[in-house]
Image (spheres, grey):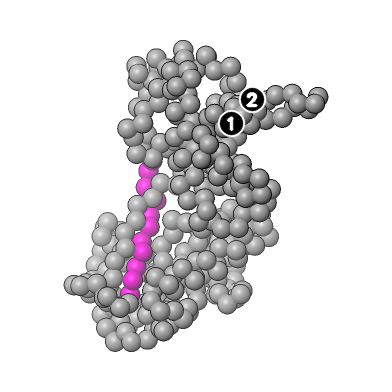
Amino acid sequence: MNDYLIKYKIATVAKLIKPFEYEGYGFTSYSEEWWNCDAWVSSRIVRAKNAGEARYIFLNELMPLIEHFSTISQCGFRFIANSYFIYKQTNNTDKTVYIHYVRPVSHTGLQFNDEEISQLANIKKAPNKKGFFYIMEAANATTFYTRLTMLIGAVEGFAGEIVTRSQKKTNLSAVKDILGDVLYDKLYRYGTGLRHKLLHGNIEGHHLFEGVNDEIYNKIREYLRSEFDIQLNENVVDPQRNFYGNFEQTSFFMKFKEEEVLDLKTIEEAVDDRYGSHPNLEMKIFSYVGEYPKDY
């Protein structure tokens, strides 16, 4: 077992005025100028077999705390797509550090040309058009679960409603036709369906939802194509692109040349040196790792 110091950036509009500790984690403002800073840094030493296990423990136990902060601050927090480093505290005479660097980039749009314009006439064929609103909202969503909720709303909007015993209800038969038996069962199965877990306030395991957004969106495209001949381009990467949540990332090992620099902001600035923002800072702090350590 080894000890690993992990410092993880948390993007948020909540301004952290002074450091505090909570549930074994330390929290500080990303910058000393807290009034002009849109991020915190969470830190903790984790005892684990390797860096991968330490990262899992760190993030898995941190996420519920972010929910608490968001509720109390009444502000948004972005838990994913953040920079962090992992520094092994034991058996690390070379002072090797693992760095995961993330930075926002501008969005890349998709074309709207003759082929797309020609599909507008087919949209009018859909009898239940409420689903189009939810597709638009799914494209505007900035988080995974927000998009998932809107995609489910799109499916149910297209399915429409039926009257049973003088009560209006979602046409679940039509929902099943859109989703297919397997995905319908995954989302709507009594007691364990992920749709019910999500909307009834009972999410138990985030891993259960992996890939669900893409599954639903592909079923919606298939439904629009087969029922109304609405041809949506399927040969694109990351459809439903929006203005937000566009990032590029890289991960690598480095060695501290002399004194360990365990400030996440400084490390990010050093990595950003590659893009010309802080000339020579990276080479002042780090030396390159030829072969990645196998037992980190």
Camera-side mark, 2 or 1: 1
- Secondary element at image label 1: helix
Q: Which quadrant of the view contains residue 85? A: bottom left
Q: Position of residue 40 (x, y in %)?
A: 52, 65
Q: Which quadrant of the view contains residue 64? A: bottom right
| Residue 268 falls left or right of residue 290 | right
Instruction: Give the distance between the C-alpha atoms of the residues marked 2 and 1, in whole angstroms.
Output: 9 Å
| Residue 225 falls within the magenta-colored stretch | no
32 over 272 or under it: above or below: below
| Residue 105 falls within the magenta-colored stretch | yes
Q: Which quadrant of the view contains residue 152? A: top right
Which contiguous range is marked in magenta? 97-107
225 over 247 or under it: above or below: above
Q: Position of residue 288 (x, y in %)?
A: 21, 72
What residue did someone put label 1 on? 175
Residue closer to the observer: 217 or 166 = 166
Numbered circle sitting on residue 85:
none
Residue closer to the observer: 255 or 161 = 161
Q: Position of residue 4 (x, y in %)?
A: 42, 79
Q: Quadrant of the N terminus?
A: bottom left
| Residue 150 falls left or right of residue 282 | right
Numbered circle sitting on residue 160:
2
Q: Residue at 34% x, 68% y: name it.
A: 99
**Three-letter code for the amino acid on which mark 2 is drawn:** Gly
| Residue 13 falls left or right of residue 268 | right
Q: Residue at 34% x, 81% y: name it.
A: 260
Q: Position of residue 135 (x, y in %)?
A: 53, 31
Q: Residue at 38% x, 57% y: name it.
A: 102
Mark 1, other Cα within 10 Å: few <14 / some 14–19 / many ≥20: many
176 over 163 or under it: above or below: below
Mark 2, other Cα within 10 Å: few <14 / some 14–19 / many ≥20: many
**Three-letter code for the amino acid on which mark 1 is drawn:** Val
